[in-house]
Amino acid sequence: MFEPHGQPTPVVRGRRADDVSACATALVAVHETDGYPVEGVTDPEAWLTPENLLRAWVAELAGEVVGHVCLTAPTDSNPVAATVRAHTGTEAAGLVVLGRLFVLPEARRHRAGELLTRTATDYAAVAGRRPVLEVMDKDRAAIRFYERLGWRRIATTGHDSGHGRVPAHHYLGPAR
């Protein structure tokens, strides 16, 4: 396994049903540290398994789940899909929403987030769909991360978090 700078490289694999509990525990820990997500921590297992889920992956480090990402199918009423349609003309059927990406703080220097994101975007490309996402303005590290990976901000809007509207940015994933 390639280990840049002497750091172990996480293994990214498809999420299994028996991973959801470990993912939920990690999500709550990330929320306590980062305030992400702004919703979903009251029932993290349900939040990690949305109805429109297409595919999900986990990152493991030393056999422990340390990160998660998923792709969901947008509807035409999805705010990010609507923004992309307005800017590019791409309908919801040509898109996937990358989301529920998180990595435990102690695993962040191991490229888990990058590997998870690249796995999801590669899957989207093979499926012939363009990845899109929404990120809250408060999540500055996430914004820097996505932009470093080639995501392009196409709009700034508001996200209804259940606790009021918060500023959010819509991104279009890099073309492959």
Image: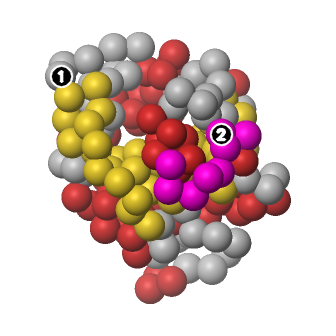
Q: Earlier in the sequence, mark 1 or mark 2?
A: 2
* Image quarter of the N terminus: bottom right
Q: Which residue is mark 2?
A: 92
Magenta stretch containing residue 6, yes or no? no
On the question of residue 18 being in view, the answer is: no
- The amino acid pointed to by label 2 is Ala
Q: Quadrant of residue 54?
A: top right
In this rendering, is residue 175 above or below 41?
below
Q: Nearer the viewer, residue 7 or 74?
A: 74
- The amino acid pointed to by label 1 is Gly
Seen from this angle, which residue lies furthest bottom? Answer: 5
In this rendering, is residue 73 above or below 105?
above
User: Is 170 placed left or right of 123 in the picture?
Assistant: left
Label 1 SS: loop
Determine the residue positioned at 48% across, 22% down. 47
* Image quarter of the C terminus: bottom right
Label 2 SS: helix
The mark total stands at: 2
Determine the residue positioned at 67% across, 43% down. 91
Q: Nearer the viewer, residue 79 or 112?
A: 79
What is the crowding at mark 2: few (fewer than 14 residues within 10 Å), some, or many (at least 20)?
A: many
Q: Position of residue 118 (x, y in %)?
A: 61, 64
Magenta stretch containing residue 88, yes or no? yes
Determine the residue positioned at 51% across, 31% down. 78
Q: Position of residue 173 (x, y in %)?
A: 55, 62
Q: Position of residue 39 (x, y in %)?
A: 32, 24
Q: Which residue is mark 1?
A: 164
Determine the residue positioned at 58% across, 22% down. 50
User: Is 27 placed left or right of 156 in the picture?
Assistant: right
Which residues are drawn in magenta?
Answer: 86-93
C-alpha gap between disc 1 and disc 2: 26 Å
